């Protein structure tokens, strides 16, 4: 059955991933009437930083800027920056859009007075096979446990965290050391977007979705975020296999906050986890050192090399930051 634009669901998206899910949904003719994010990354930059971003994306990368506020303006979609200080304003903005569905991706926890505004409720994209890894840091704990089955769940939001009825799931087996950013891209493009489109189409045709209730308990502890100190303490440089540590470092970007702070002018480079080398290493483990192969993190069984590439973008950003200070 085909629908005229006026009969399509009015969809609003609250996301922390810039235009990652918004662009493909709009391309698939989803009727997105509003988009929002907690923080307007581009709008809150100063003019020199905005110039650097435009130069980097448009001249160096020859691509559109990834920022949601710019994308919304270009496509005539209502945009709002959802800060905790303007909760009432955000609720008024949302009500004025008269949404049928609110979709969340990498979004903050919402109160019931917000997630109950849409006619058909609020749907969330969570990057795990719920009820496993409920919480805001699922990739780290997935990698920490050497759980090689990555997954995504589309579910309803309720009063608790990641406990709402499941609409659909998708999963695939990952290889050791696969960066979580690559895993996330596959989960969104190959599974989450199709699940979401199917759910929207079902609501348009029948007004309801088939769901599966979650069990009350999760087989894994709450996937909490860690402070930099707690993150470092969670890494085992002596008892883990070297490959285990390498795998966990690829789970998110928090290793940058912990290890790059020890490298002078590290903010002028793009850094990635490179490869491992088994060799004799002397104490202390868990430190960053440099040899002919480059910077590396020491482990009892060897080293994990860091790859650095000079970034014109980061150089100018750090330069403007130093001038401003």
Image (tube, rainbow, N blue to C red):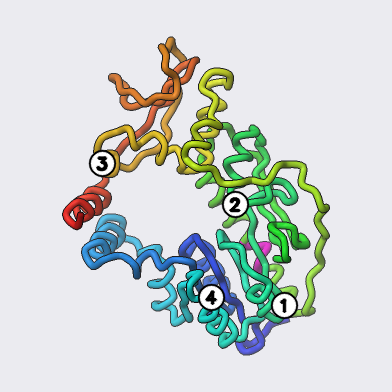
**Residue stretch in magenta:** 193-197
**Mark toward the viewer: 1 or 4:** 4
Q: Earlier in the sequence, mark 1 or mark 3?
A: 1
Q: Is residue 174 above or below residue 21?
A: above
Pick the residue in front: 269 or 32.
Answer: 269
**Cα–Cα gap, marks 4 and 3:** 41 Å
- Give the x, y percent position of residue 26: 53, 73
Q: Is residue 277 visible?
A: no
State the SS at label 1: loop
- Secondary structure under badge 3? strand
Give yes or no for contact between labels 2 and 1 (Cβ–Cβ under 8 Å).
no
Instruction: Tell me the element at label 4.
Output: helix
Circle 1 crowding by C-alpha within 10 Å: few under 14, some 14–19, many from 20: some
How many marks are shown on the rendered structure? Answer: 4
Report, in whole angstroms, how far the alpha carbon at label 1 lies from the one at label 3. Answer: 48 Å
**Left or right: where 317 falls relative to 270:** left
Seen as rendered, the residue at the extreme left is: 323
- Identify residue for label 1: 120
- Please check the rendered image and state whether residue 324 is part of the magenta-colored stretch, yes or no: no
Earlier residue among tags 2 and 4: 4
Say above or below: 119 vs 324: below
Which residue is under mark 2? 136
């Amino acid at each position: 059955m085909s629908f005229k634009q006026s009969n399509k669901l009015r969809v609003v998206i609250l996301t922390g991933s810039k235009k990652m899910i918004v662009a493909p949904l709009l391309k698939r003719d989803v009727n997105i009437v509003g988009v929002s994010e907690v923080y307007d990354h581009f709008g809150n930059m100063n003019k020199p930083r905005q110039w650097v971003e435009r130069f980097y994306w448009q001249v160096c990368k020859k691509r559109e800027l990834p920022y949601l506020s710019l994308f919304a303006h270009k496509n005539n979609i209502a945009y709002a920056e959802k800060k905790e200080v303007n909760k009432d304003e955000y609720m008024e903005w949302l009500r004025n859009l008269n949404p049928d569905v609110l979709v969340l991706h990498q979004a903050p926890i919402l109160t019931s007075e917000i997630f109950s505004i849409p006619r058909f409720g609020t749907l969330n994209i969570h990057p795990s096979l719920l009820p496993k890894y409920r919480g805001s840091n699922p990739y780290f704990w997935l990698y920490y446990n050497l759980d090689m089955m990555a997954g995504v769940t589309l579910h309803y939001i309720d009063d608790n965290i990641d406990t709402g009825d499941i609409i659909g799931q998708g999963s695939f087996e990952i290889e050791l050391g696969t960066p979580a950013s690559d895993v996330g891209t596959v989960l969104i493009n190959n599974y989450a977007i199709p699940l979401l489109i199917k759910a929207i189409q079902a609501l348009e045709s029948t007004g309801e979705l088939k769901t599966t209730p979650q069990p009350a308990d999760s087989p894994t502890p709450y996937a909490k975020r860690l402070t930099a100190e707690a993150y470092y303490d969670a890494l085992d440089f002596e008892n883990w296999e070297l490959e285990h540590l390498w795998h966990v470092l690829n789970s998110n970007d928090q290793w940058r906050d912990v290890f790059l702070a020890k490298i002078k002018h590290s903010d002028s480079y793009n850094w990635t986890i490179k490869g491992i080398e088994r060799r004799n290493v002397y104490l202390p483990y868990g430190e960053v050192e440099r040899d002919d192969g480059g910077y590396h993190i020491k482990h009892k069984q060897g080293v994990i090399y860091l790859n650095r590439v000079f970034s014109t973008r980061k150089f100018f950003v750090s330069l403007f930051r130093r001038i401003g200070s």
